[in-house]
Image (cartoon, helix red, strand yellow):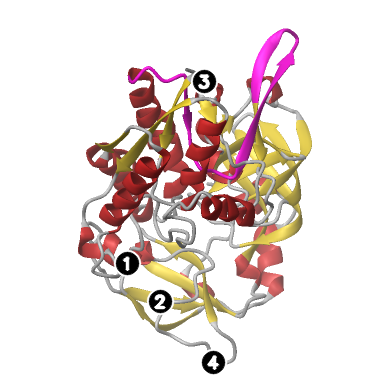
Amino acid sequence: MGKRVVVGLSGGVDSSVAAHLLIEQGYEVIGVFMKNWHDSSVTISNDCPWIEDSNDALLVAEKLNIPFQTIDYSESYKERIVDYMFSEYENGRTPNPDVLCNREIKFDLFLKTALELGADFVATGHYCRKETTSVNGSEFHRLLSGKDVNKDQSYFLCQLNQKQLSKALFPIGELTKPEVREIAKTIELTTADKKDSQGLCFIGKVKLPDFLQQQLQPKSGRVIEIEATHEMYSNKIGDSLIAKSTGFHYSESDGKSIGSHNGAHYYTIGQRKGLGIGGTVEPLFVIGTDVKNNVVYTGQGENHPGLYRSALFISNDEIHWVRNDLQLQVGEKKSYLVRIRYRQKLQKATVECALEGLYISFEVPQRGITPGQFAAWYWEDELIGSGVIQ
């Protein structure tokens, strides 16, 4: 019998095929379904997504003839992910639960469970790759983009460390989504044609406002429209890298009141839907929020300068390097490719290390840079590091 691998069977086609490929490669495979959510009160349909997914995972395990069990992480998920999300939204930031889910649940709690089961590795159905290299006698694990550029999920794993990567396998990283589905059909897996899951990680399709209102109470405030005068933005920013990276700061005197909202903490930069107010000429977008004073700032049109920034900042306590040997020292700067959200095309940028943290300056101004989200930087197809945008 080969080395033991515990596969996170999510009930989807990707993890199903990952398990199959590992069996073909000679591993002893165990399937585990992670139950991380049980509150159906905020789901969009009456379905209970985790039960359906768990049943699909069980059917796959039976088809592949591997041991299977469900493990309940819902209490830890609430503490580590859900409570963090509420805190971030309350403070006017927009968190990324999928990145946290991988760092805190899949590659921490789940990894520990797998090791207790005597596993040598854990495996998931992520579209990414891992390579091991040696630098000056030391071994490092490289986190690489998936071969399918349309499905690359390396961004979601941007917070993993070397210890976690050393125990991780990504069996479908060399495949495209159509190839994965074809394999599933060939071996007659029940998940072959199952649609990809949507919504929050491990929760399913959720009404986010309803979800947030479980703890964040509605609170009426003013919506202020800021006119798109480029001169104002030039005066506010100038050439200062610090100013460029911290974004625009508005006051109510900068614009005019055009209506009300139900809580600044429900809104995020770049958001269009949910305001309930239309622009007089072009659609309205959120260009800033002030949760302290409960004000939402908006601007008309896709090209409103308030939607764009040319730089961002990550404080020292939020910087994560996947490989310490590539860490920049104070005063150093390097050109990287940077992504500020999943599925965004990689953008050319300069990453500069200062005493207070990292500054990332883009060749082309970026739309909707959002505090609380993760920026990840790459060298070619290797993910080098990441951090929470301030």
Please say if 170 is above or below 98. Answer: above
The residue located at (74%, 28%) in the rendering is 331
Looking at the image, can residue 264 be seen? yes
- The label number, if any, that marks residue 280 in the structure image: 4
Decide: few, some or many residues near mark 1? Use Cα within 10 Å; few <14, some 14-19, many ≥20: some
- The label number, if any, that marks residue 163 in the structure image: 3
Decide: few, some or many residues near mark 2? Use Cα within 10 Å; few <14, some 14-19, many ≥20: few
In this rendering, the label closer to the viewer, 4 or 3: 3
Lower position in the chain sequence, tag 4 or tag 1: 1
**Mark 1 vs 3: CB contact within 8 A:** no
Q: Mark 4 and mark 3: span between their CA atoms?
A: 54 Å
Lower position in the chain sequence, tag 4 or tag 3: 3
Q: Mark 4 and mark 1: span between their CA atoms?
A: 26 Å
Magenta segment includes 127: yes
Q: Which residue is mark 2?
A: 274
Question: Would you say 315 lies left or right of 381 here?
Answer: left
- The label number, if any, that marks residue 209 in the structure image: 1
What secondary structure is marked by label 2?
Answer: loop
Task: State the extent of the magenta-drawn residues as a range.
Answer: 117-141
Lower position in the chain sequence, tag 1 or tag 2: 1
The residue located at (72%, 48%) in the rendering is 361
Q: Mark 1 and mark 2: span between their CA atoms?
A: 9 Å
Q: How many discs appear? A: 4
What secondary structure is marked by label 1?
Answer: helix
Residue 230 at what x, y percent from top left?
70, 72
Question: Would you say 239 lies left or right of 228 here?
Answer: right
Residue 194 at what x, y percent from top left?
45, 60
Q: What kind of residue is marked 4?
A: Thr
